[in-house]
Image (tube, rainbow, N blue to C red):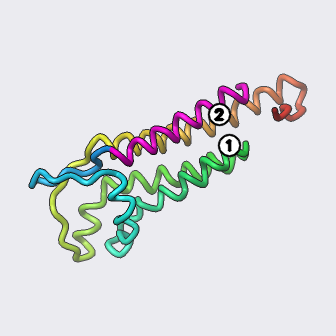
Amino acid sequence: MSTLARRALFAGIAAAWLASLALPAIHLPSGAAYDGAELLRRAWAAPRAGVYAWYANPLFVAASVAAVLRWLRAAGVLSGVALVLALTSFAARPLARASGVAVPDWSFGAGFYLWLAALAALCAAAWGCVACERSAASAAGGKPAERD
């Protein structure tokens, strides 16, 4: 994959993550909604309730930086851990209730699903780039691919 194509891919993934912050991520039965940016500001305290999904965000940023620097394996590992943490969102309500925190019912919105898709896309892209570099190295007789 060319440098330009790789940069465009990772820029698109970062743009999706940023767009998720502007969209409704959680809808409450009262009709109120919280966008991704509001959850980013507030949910850092969620580990007290046993919910660790918020930590996917700093890992996403770190993985994005690693991808831009072509530390693709590091980007793959960081984004993989971020994705696993993000998936714990589906268990947030029972985990919070089990810890004794009063939690209203809610449903996930488009911002949540775009956020999750951006995390999954970063993980897939990072590992896809690792595979491309490995394939290029094999084609070159075992020599590492040139970095452009």
Query: Quick check: 126 above or below 2?
Result: below
Coordinates of residue 44 in the picture (x, y in percent) = 40, 67
Q: Dot 2: few (<14), some (14–19), or many (≥20) neighbours within 10 Å? A: some
Residue furthest to the top in view is: 139
Return the mark for residue 7. Answer: 2
Residue 71 horizontal side relative to residue 102, left or right:
right
Q: Nearer the viewer, residue 62 or 144?
A: 62
Residue 63 horizontal side relative to residue 136, left or right:
left
Residue 123 occupies which quadrant of the picture?
top right
Residue placed at 47% from the left, 56% from the top?
56
Return the mark for residue 68. Answer: 1
Instruction: Please state the extent of the stretch shown in magenta in the rendering.
Output: 1-22
Coordinates of residue 137 in the picture (x, y in percent) = 83, 30
Query: Quick check: 53 above or below 19?
Result: below
Main SS of the magenta segment? helix
Q: Is residue 119 magenta?
A: no
Residue placed at 24% from the left, 63% from the top?
94
For the residues marked 1 and 2, what is the alpha-carbon distance in whole angstroms?
Answer: 7 Å
Coordinates of residue 72 in the picture (x, y in percent) = 69, 43
Coordinates of residue 85 in the picture (x, y in percent) = 45, 57
Residue placed at 72% from the left, 25% from the top?
2
Residue furthest to the left in view is: 30
Label 2 SS: helix
Q: Amino acid at mark 2?
A: Arg
Q: Is residue 17 magenta?
A: yes
- Name the image quarter holding the C terminus: top right
Q: Nearer the viewer, residue 21 or 120?
A: 21
Residue 24 horizontal side relative to residue 115, left or right:
left
Label 1 SS: helix
- Name the image quarter holding the N terminus: top right
Residue 10 occupies which quadrant of the picture?
top right
Determine whether label 1 and label 2 are within 8 Å by CB: yes
